[in-house]
Image (cartoon, rainbow, N blue to C red):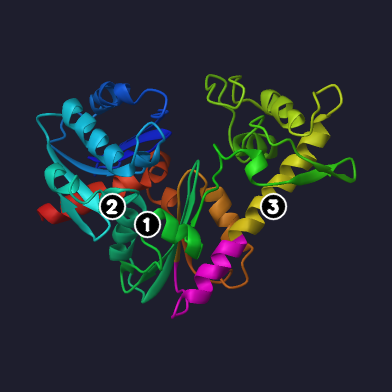
Amino acid sequence: MGVDIGGANLKLASVSGRAISQPFAIWREPERLADRLEELMAVFPAVKRLAITMTAELADCFPTKADGVREILAAIGRAAPRLEHRVWTLDGRFRTPNEAVVVPELVAAANWHGLATWIGRRLHVPSALLIDIGSTTSDIIPIVHGRPATRGLTDPGRLQSGELVYTGVSRTPVCAVVHSVRYRDKPCRVCAELFATLRDVFLVTGDLPEAPDDHDTADGRPATRPAAHARLARMIGCDTTEFAWDDAVTLAEDVAEQQLQALHEALDEVLRDMTEPTQAVVLSGSGTFLADRLVNSSPALRDVPTERLDRFLSAEAATAACAYAIAQLARDLDG
């Protein structure tokens, strides 16, 4: 089973394609990680080995990323003490937990590398591109001759190269994407406050489904369209008495367009640095709909064959794509 420990979500996937993605804000209660993992792992009773990757080491509950790597691996050890553990690292191999804590710089934020490595082994073209858009971040990863071929390897390096964009379809604050929006045919600056997120934007546009029982939102109210309408109103100092549904749609479309433009700028930078024309594009993540839109609006990629992971994996496995990928890599290692 693959285990992907994110800062805001826990994702588990078996090689059979069974997968779970659950919110877990590790920065709020890191001491509960082992218990939460144990609960989720109970859904996979036949598992004997864990393949592990993470991004949660960056959470500010840990003094350093090395501390985060060490504490996360220790929590997984407490959650599953009888299972064999393998940790994916940025040099394209698995290590034992004891080996991994010695090289935390190779463990930190390595989940994208595992996904790209697995995708690369499935492709049979010299040059490809993986676009993985999740709740928080977007990865734009060149794959050359079956291997990840990024200019950056760590988070800061990939942020500099455009291969990592810290924007997603759920958790990103609206004020991190735009400085102003259209409001009744005039530009309006937005409040620099966590009043709404991109989840509200895509709830209003209809790209994301409502989840009335989910209160992991900016104001703790449910993830429904009426509540998203109210949250977006506050982005320009309004409430719903002065901000109609049509105003919310206009604002949401404006924010979505500006986010898409930022992704285009990163995509163009990555494409300029690729030495061979892209011959295939693979899309994954909970924001696959946005990745699809990005590719279809890119002149350089519009005619390139594109494959969506959610077309041949279950929706759950496609959302937990990094966990599923490292589970597959670990199985391949076993022959």
The reply, left or right, for residue 8 in relation to residue 101 is: right
User: Where residue 258 is drawn, which disc sits there?
Assistant: 3
- Return the disc, 1 or 2, that comes first in the chain's sequence: 2
- Kindly identify the amino acid type of the residue bearing the numbered disc 3: Gln
Describe the element under mark 1 as helix, strand or loop: loop
Q: Is residue 160 above or below residue 275?
A: above
Is label 2 in a helix, a strand or a loop? helix
Q: Nearer the viewer, residue 240 or 154?
A: 154
Dot 2: few (<14), some (14–19), or many (≥20) neighbours within 10 Å? some
Q: Which residues are magenta?
A: 264-280
Q: Residue at x 25, y 33 (%)?
A: 71
Q: Position of residue 181 (x, y in %)?
A: 78, 45
Say what amino acid the circle numbered 2 marks: Glu
Lower sequence index among marks 1 and 3: 1
Say which label, 3 or 2, has the lower sequence index. 2
Residue position marked by numbered label 1 in the rendering? 154
Which residue is situated farthest in the front direction here?
Answer: 63
Q: Residue at x 73, y 46 (%)?
A: 179
Query: Where's residue 279, x and y in %?
Result: 45, 74
Q: Looking at numbered disc 1 in the image, what kind of residue is underneath it?
A: Thr
Circles 1 and 2: CB distance less than 8 Å?
yes
Which residue occupies 17% across, 26% down? Answer: 78
Tell me, yes or no, whether the highlighted magenta stretch contains residue 313: no
Q: Position of residue 148 (x, y in %)?
A: 34, 65
Residue corresponding to mark 2: 105
